[in-house]
Image (cartoon, helix red, strand yellow):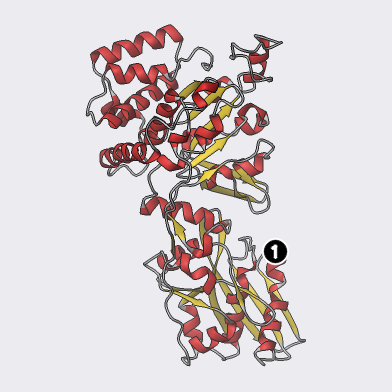
Amino acid sequence: MVARAHTVAFQGVEARPVEVQCAVTPGLPAFSIVGLPDKAVSEARDRVRSALNSMAIALPAKRITINLSPADLPKEGSHFDLPIAMALLAALDIIPMDAVEGTVALGELSLDGSLMPVVGALPAAMTAAAENRALLCPRASSAEAAWVGAAQVLGADTLGAVVRHFSGQSPLPEAQPGEVDLAPCPRDLRDVKGQERAKRALEIAAAGRHHLIMIGTPGSGKSMLAARIPGILPPLTAVEALETSMIQSLCGLLDEGGISRSRPFREPHHTASMAAIVGGGKGAKPGEISLAHNGVLFMDEFPEFPRTVLETLRQPIETGEVMVARANAHVKYPCRFMLVAAANPCKCGYLTDPARACGRAPNCGDDYLGRISGPLMDRFDLRIEVPPVDFTDLDLPPSGESSATVAMRVMAARDIQAERFRGHHAIRQNADAEGKTLEQVATPDAEGKELLLKAADRFGLSARAYHRILRVARTIADLEGVKDVRRPHVAEALSFRVSARVAA
């Protein structure tokens, strides 16, 4: 008789159902696992054997065969330990076979039978709910999985507790969802002296999820401004939190199994590889652009990133998803992020500083910023110069609006967009609008359209730039609470697009 248990194999953020079949037959004593397992799965037989021995359960002197079906789907990870043990226990008539078949299980076994936390409990719970099954996982991983209310989630500490649960001796309690408190951002916009135009650009970018590039001399405050973006972003919605947490669950980044409403803020170093930024490596894991989904990807020293890495951003910026294609895996990840880049105007950094002389002007700036291709620069909605701050301004007391005040306006603008795009599955913010939808919501009045057409002709704007200006103008109107896009909104959007030094 063949006993069956159920688990999942991960392909991107998708958890594919896997049936674990166990047959105990006469023959030479052996314990084999088939079905395209990787090294970690193949080693499960030793962990399962030791865990059963710790419970005084001896394996019979027979041939034990574990088949992971479908056999052509690669199986990776140590989370197969628990379902393999459950299928084996059911084949030995230690736990009821029908109870095991109604559960999706995942968990890593230690040699003494303890269950260790694993990654991917949240996507696994989604699959269990779709199959109308319960999810059994280590207790340390159950809090994140419990967020999927459609599935019953059970958390266990040991394999012995699993046996007692299925035998009816001591049922496992249902897990409760965990949540990380939304901690306030310790960095406030009031800490930034001057730079009012840059602050305005941050507000517009945060309100509409527009891409932003800041170019300025070293020490002008570019990184300081970017570090304060999380303080003006609204919390994640329930749907966004679930999407973001599924990616973080696959990478083991959820704090104690809790789901946070804080938006991701990723800032990779400029030495990061293409696989680290876009995704890849063994199993085609998500990269920084996917970990920044629904949040911010801040790339400081933007021209210092390898050219090949920068060019890979072009397609994800447009589509909001990335296909990581490798020889043994083709995985699609969501990556709808807000790109914030910072760069010096030239190699030495002082091309635009009137107080210092750049020894290689003007070629120094052209060569340095030339590392950013025209098609990539064209994808930035907002481009600003960040001038150096005068020393006398540093002694002044904090001035300007706080992050909390700006965050209220950003939240109000986002609420307007949420209502506007209700029913549009692929559109959440103004930056996502395109085609007829963009025409309906962002067509300016006659004066605004005339100004935009003149600017397009004067500066040779591309069709992409034309549409991005409309989206930014729509966001500026939303920040003012105005229904129609007018000439002042278009004018301000243009001012962030055709800056003399930053324009591509």
Q: Is residue 1 visible?
A: no
Horizontal side, residue 217 vs residue 281: left or right: left
Q: Secondary structure at mark 1?
A: loop
* Extreme-left residue of the structure: 483
- The one nearer the camera, 399 or 483, is 399
> Residue at 54% across / 47% down in the picture?
291
> Looking at the rendering, which quadrant does residue 274 occupy?
top right
Where is 290 relative to 18, above or below? above
> Residue at 64% across / 34% down in the picture?
309
Horizontal side, residue 187 vs residue 159: left or right: left
- The one nearer the camera, 208 or 407, is 407
Where is 358 relative to 78, above or below? above
Q: Quadrant of the N terminus?
A: bottom right
In the picture of the structure, the residue carrying the numbered disc 1 is: 38
Where is 152 relative to 265, above or below? below
Q: Quadrant of the C terminus?
A: top right
Measuring from the top left, give residue 36's x and y in whole percent.
Answer: 67, 64
Q: How many marks?
A: 1
> Residue at 27% across / 43% down in the picture?
422
> Residue at 64% across / 64% down in the picture?
77
Where is 327 relative to 130, above or below? above
- The one nearer the camera, 229 or 251, is 229
